[in-house]
Image: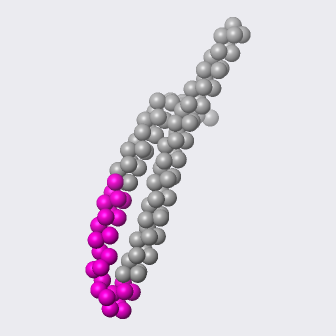
Amino acid sequence: MADIEIRPETLRRAADDLDRAAAQFRSQLEQMRGQLSGFADAWGNDDLGALIGETVTVCTDVLDGLFTDILDELDHDAADLVGIADNHEHTDSQAATRFKQTGV
């Protein structure tokens, strides 16, 4: 079985990278929302324009929801990585304390 080495600082850096990626994605999503809001009246007032406008609205709402879910998952994953790093350090610290107490 291969040895696994967990480095809390690497986990925290990965969490920071995820946070930065999520922030950039959030910013791009906001830009996209702003651009799409400018198209609200671009489809015209006839039946075909109304159908296109409704289709665009439904599709963008679905995509927006999916993108928001992805961002939520990135936030949770980053927090989980920090939690894993914290737990690992805490466990290592407790183990070291126990070894010192037993004189090993």
- Residue 7: say if magenta: no
In the rendered image, residue 28, in percent from the top left (x then y), is placed at 33, 57
Residue 24 visible: yes
Q: Name the residue located 30 percent from the left edge and 79 percent from the top edge.
A: 41
Which corner quadrant holds the C terminus?
top right
Q: Is residue 11 left or right of residue 21?
A: right
Query: In the figure, 57 relative to 35: above or below?
Result: below
Query: In the figure, 64 relative to 19: above or below?
Result: below
- In the rendered image, the residue lying farthest to the right is 102
Magenta residues: mostly which secondary structure?
helix
Query: In the figure, 14 relative to 65: above or below?
Result: above
Which corner quadrant holds the N terminus?
top right
Q: Name the residue located 28 percent from the left edge and 71 percent from the top edge.
A: 38
Q: Name the residue located 44 percent from the left edge and 61 percent from the top edge.
A: 67
In front here: 20 or 33? 33
Residue 91 found in image quarter: top right
Write the start and end of the magenta stretch as one range. Answer: 27-52
In the rendered image, residue 100, in percent from the top left (x then y), is placed at 66, 10
In front here: 76 or 13? 76
Q: Name the residue located 72 percent from the left edge and 10 percent from the top edge.
A: 102
Q: Is residue 55 left or right of residue 84?
A: left
Q: Is residue 37 left or right of residue 3?
A: left
